[in-house]
Amino acid sequence: MRTIIVDSLPQNVAPSKKDLPAMPFLQMATATVDEVGCSMKLCKVPGSNDFYSIACYYGPPRVQLRVPIYHPGEPCTECRPGTKCIEKMKISALKSFADRVNSQRK
């Protein structure tokens, strides 16, 4: 595995046609997506290495070409109604879930 450390994230990331292979990642990274569902299955292959297959689906809105996937700003300053910041991760989630996660670290 490779880790890349950057001092700052690029601003105004707007996908173009050359980014089509990265669309699954871009859909996950889009600031406005608020639905996600993932599944994992252990695949056993006789005479070979077993492996896990993981698939995730992300809810609307869909990534659009030439439309930025997020805009620069401070984390958790624009949480939508009904959501709250998960402080440790600096992401927003449904208020009831965020409250549960935030209370676990106290």
Image: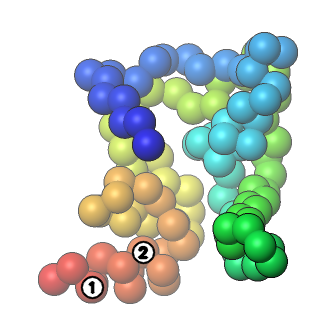
The relative height of residue 1 versus residue 16 in the rendered view (above or below) is below
Work out whether residue 13 or residue 72 is closer to the camera in this orientation and state it: 13
Q: Amino acid at mark 2?
A: Ala
Where on the picture, by quarter, is residue 81? bottom right
Residue at left offset 54%, top offset 72%: 94
Q: Amino acid at mark 1?
A: Gln
Work out whether residue 18 or residue 51 is closer to the camera in this orientation and state it: 51
Q: Kindly report the distance in space between the C-alpha atoms of the residues bearing marks 2 and 1.
A: 10 Å
Q: Look at mark 2 in the image and give the residue it sits on.
A: 98
Total residue callouts: 2
Q: Look at mark 1 in the image and give the residue it sits on.
A: 104
- Residue 8 in view in this figure: yes
| Residue 25 x/y as whole percent | 66, 41
| Residue 37 x/y as whole percent | 72, 69
Residue at left offset 21%, top offset 79%: 105
- Residue 37 in view in this figure: no
Crowd tier of the residue under label 2, counting other residues whose Cα lies within 10 Å: few below 14, some 14–19, many 20 or above? some
Q: Mark 2: which secondary structure?
A: helix
| Residue 24 x/y as whole percent | 74, 43
Q: Residue furthest front?
A: 47
| Residue 27 x/y as whole percent | 71, 43
The relative height of residue 12 versus residue 103 in the rendered view (above or below) is above
Dot in front, 2 or 1: 1
